[in-house]
Amino acid sequence: MGLGLTLLNQCRLIVFAMQRIIDRKVYYTASAERIAKHGAIVDKGDFHALAETLYKDSNGEYFLHCQGGAATEYAEQTSNGTTYGETLELLTKEEALDWCEKRAASSEIVLEEFADLIENGNAAE
């Protein structure tokens, strides 16, 4: 067996870009700007592994690339039960900010990306 096949057989952590057409628009993780990520790289063999990555495309639209093992909300049903699954979810700017707050994204990233939606709680009245 060649070295490449040996390494491929030993490696379970393979990350692919995801592309999906939604409402006649193409959303592609490889060409979008990654804003924030929650969770580790998904090992497809780990039933509880979960990763969510927030992206913004060139048109300023936000979407979430969600990946998860067989015991997560992103699992896909098969004839033998559930398995690893992934999906893209479209988000409004407000929903993207909500996701960042829920997932405790870096405040620097949140302020840079969503400054127009954030109130300064320390402002003098």
Image (cartoon, grey):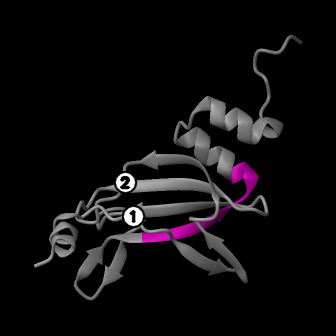
Say what amino acid the circle numbered 2 marks. Ile
Which residue is rendered at x = 50% and y = 70% of the image?
87
**Disc 1: which residue:** 15
For the C terminus, the quadrant is top right
Residue at 74% x, 61% y: name it: 61
Looking at the image, residue 75 sits to the left or right of residue 3; the answer is right
Please identify, in this view, whether the residue under mark 1 or under mark 2 is nearer the observer: 1
Which amino acid is tagged 1? Answer: Val
Identify the residue at horizontal 29%, vertical 74% (top origin): 83
Instruction: Confirm or deny contact between disc 1 and disc 2 (CB under 8 A).
Output: yes
Q: Which residues are magenta?
A: 86-95
- Classified by dominant secondary structure, the portion drawn in magenta counts as strand
Seen in the image, is 97 located left or right of residue 124?
left
Q: Which residue is mark 2?
A: 41
* Residue 111 counted in the magenta span: no
The quadrant of the image that shows the N terminus is: bottom left
Residue depicted at 72% across the width and 41% down the height:
113
Which mark is drawn over residue 101? Answer: none
